[in-house]
Amino acid sequence: METATAVNSLRAVMSFHQTDADLASITLPTLILYDEHESSVIRRHVPTLAAEIPDATVQEVPNAGRASPWDNPGFFNEAVEEFFPETSQSARR
């Protein structure tokens, strides 16, 4: 990831508490994945997301830093497939 992209991503996450997004208005089941070795800036928002989004499922991706699909693709893919079983079934056809 380029430095500018990383800085912009961190700025967006750091301003999360300033958003007026109504997380309670999310009506679909939501999968929240965060990496085991994620920065504290990201990790501190997980409880807020889990508490405010109805029907949220939270999972920590083990042995992952900031790029769980690449750091632990087996766990990541399995978590997504279990969360969206109908999608994973149609993809295999």
Image (cartoon, rainbow, N blue to C red):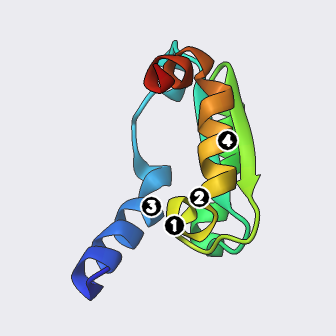
Element assignment for label 2: helix
- Mark 2–mark 1 CB contact (< 8 Å): yes
In the rendered structure, which amino acid carries the disc numbered 3? Val
Q: Nearer the viewer, mark 3 or mark 4?
A: 4
Cα gap from disc 2 to disc 1, whole angstroms: 5 Å
| Residue that numbered label 4 is attached to | 78
| Residue that numbered label 1 is attached to | 70
Residue at 62% x, 20% y is 85
Residue at 32% x, 79% y is 1
Q: Nearer the viewer, mark 3 or mark 1?
A: 1
| Residue that numbered label 2 is attached to | 73
Cα gap from disc 4 to disc 2, whole angstroms: 8 Å
48 on left or right of 15: right
Asked whether residue 44 is in view, the answer is: no
80, 59: nearer the viewer: 80
18 on left or right of 85: left
Cα gap from disc 3 to disc 2, whole angstroms: 23 Å
| Residue that numbered label 3 is attached to | 13
Local packing at callout 2 (Cα closer than 10 Å; few below 14, some 14-19, many 20+) is some
Residue 13 location (% of width, % of height):
44, 61
Q: Is residue 40 above or below residue 43?
A: below
Residue 71 location (% of width, % of height):
59, 70
In the rendered structure, which amino acid carries the disc numbered 1? Trp
Element assignment for label 1: helix
Q: Nearer the viewer, mark 3 or mark 2?
A: 2
89, 35: nearer the viewer: 89
Q: Earlier in the sequence, mark 3 or mark 2?
A: 3
